[in-house]
Image: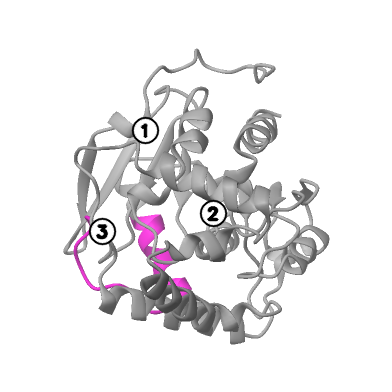
């Protein structure tokens, strides 16, 4: 792997050992983890539907944090964060901006995955001075094809997973092929690497609020992506059954400064986890260019 240009010295910290901290803002405590070099523009990670701190692939976080200051956090009311979970993407975006400013940052990069990608789009459009660059993975624009079906798919996969004792992420994030299933199992093993101070799963009321927010986003009038003036790197698997992959192509085409990573073969919603080495390299090159 080539080293990104003009990078700070690499970090040896690991996500599985990163301390969980909290910051208070507007009556709620937001749980977060931070690792990587302390200089440079921080990279804020915006998690997927129902995601908590421990749902980030440690290979992706560690790969990025080898060269960049990386911060993950729990949305309001989710995991280790207190408060009531918003039921709109716009309110989640306002929370994320408050969180970023509470940590004292006046410029950041964003990496939004799935629902986190919806949030990232709103922040980039509404806070152009705060956001330098954006990475969007497994996501789509407001009103995008099939996004309003995500809640039903999620509930269906969760119920099926409970009956078959199988993590619903296997069917939602990965393809139903030999290599897709193996990639899914490998990913789930990596999520278990952290053995202490693990985050709490999302509660049912918080999940309901997020499902409502995602459905609203999917049914909104298509957003004017020309309002996003920052460079944006877009990634996905070629067979995303949650947020259909054509949304990724749509984003790359409609964003004024959109750049597409060729869709990962035999990969779905979790394509950036399945191809973590390639994704991390491309993401770092984009952020440093």
* Relative depth, front residue between 106 and 1: 1
The residue drawn where x is 29% and y is 48% is 102
Binning the other alpha carbons within 10 Å of mark 2 as few (below 14), some (14 to 19) or many (20 upward) gives many
Which residue is at the front of the view, 252 or 102? Answer: 252
User: Magenta segment range?
Assistant: 80-98
Most foreground residue, 101 or 96: 96
**Residue 203 visible in the current orientation:** yes
* Left or right relative to 194: residue 231: right
Q: Secondary structure at mark 1?
A: helix
Mark 1 and mark 3 in contact (Cβ < 8 Å)? no
Q: Which circle's residue, 3 or 2, is located before the other in the chain? A: 3
For disc 3, the neighbor class at 10 Å (few under 14, some 14 to 19, many from 20) is many
Instruction: Provide the residue designation for mark 2.
Output: 112
Examine the rendered structure and indicate whether residue 99 appears above or below residue 197. below
Residue occupying the point 34% across, 74% down: 207
Residue 13 lies in magenta, yes or no? no
Question: For residue 79, which numbered disc appears in the image?
Answer: 3
Mark carried by residue 15:
1
In this rendered view, identify the residue nearer to me: 100 or 248.
248
Could you give the CA–CA distance between mark 1 and mark 2, rounded to whole angstroms?
18 Å
Rendered location of residue 76, percent (x, y): 29, 64
């Amino acid at each position: 792997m080539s080293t990104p240009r003009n990078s700070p010295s690499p970090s040896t910290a690991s996500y599985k050992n990163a301390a969980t901290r909290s910051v208070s803002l507007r009556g709620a405590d937001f749980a977060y983890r931070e690792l990587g070099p302390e200089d440079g523009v921080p990279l804020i990670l915006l998690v997927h539907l129902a995601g908590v701190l421990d749902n980030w692939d440690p290979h992706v976080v560690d790969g990025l944090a080898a060269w960049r200051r990386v911060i993950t956090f729990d949305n309001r009311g989710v995991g280790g964060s207190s408060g009531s979970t918003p039921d709109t993407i716009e309110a989640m975006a306002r929370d994320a901006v408050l969180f970023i400013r509470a940590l004292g940052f006046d410029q950041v990069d964003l990496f939004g995955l799935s629902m986190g990608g919806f949030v990232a789009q709103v922040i980039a459009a509404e806070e152009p001075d705060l956001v330098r660059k954006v990475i969007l993975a497994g996501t789509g624009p407001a009103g995008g094809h099939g996004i309003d079906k995500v809640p039903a798919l999620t509930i269906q996969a969760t119920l099926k997973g409970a009956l078959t004792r199988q993590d619903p992420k296997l069917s939602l994030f990965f393809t139903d092929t030999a290599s897709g299933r193996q990639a899914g199992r490998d990913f789930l093993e990596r999520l278990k690497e952290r053995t202490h101070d693990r985050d709490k799963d999302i509660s049912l009321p918080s999940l309901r609020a997020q499902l409502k927010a995602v459905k609203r986003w999917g049914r909104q009038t298509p957003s004017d992506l020309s309002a996003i003036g920052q460079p944006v790197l877009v990634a996905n698997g070629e067979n995303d059954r949650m947020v259909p992959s054509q949304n990724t192509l749509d984003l790359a085409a409609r964003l004024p400064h959109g750049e597409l990573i060729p869709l990962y073969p035999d990969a779905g919603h979790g394509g950036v986890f399945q191809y973590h080495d390639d994704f991390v390299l491309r993401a770092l090159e984009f952020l440093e260019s």
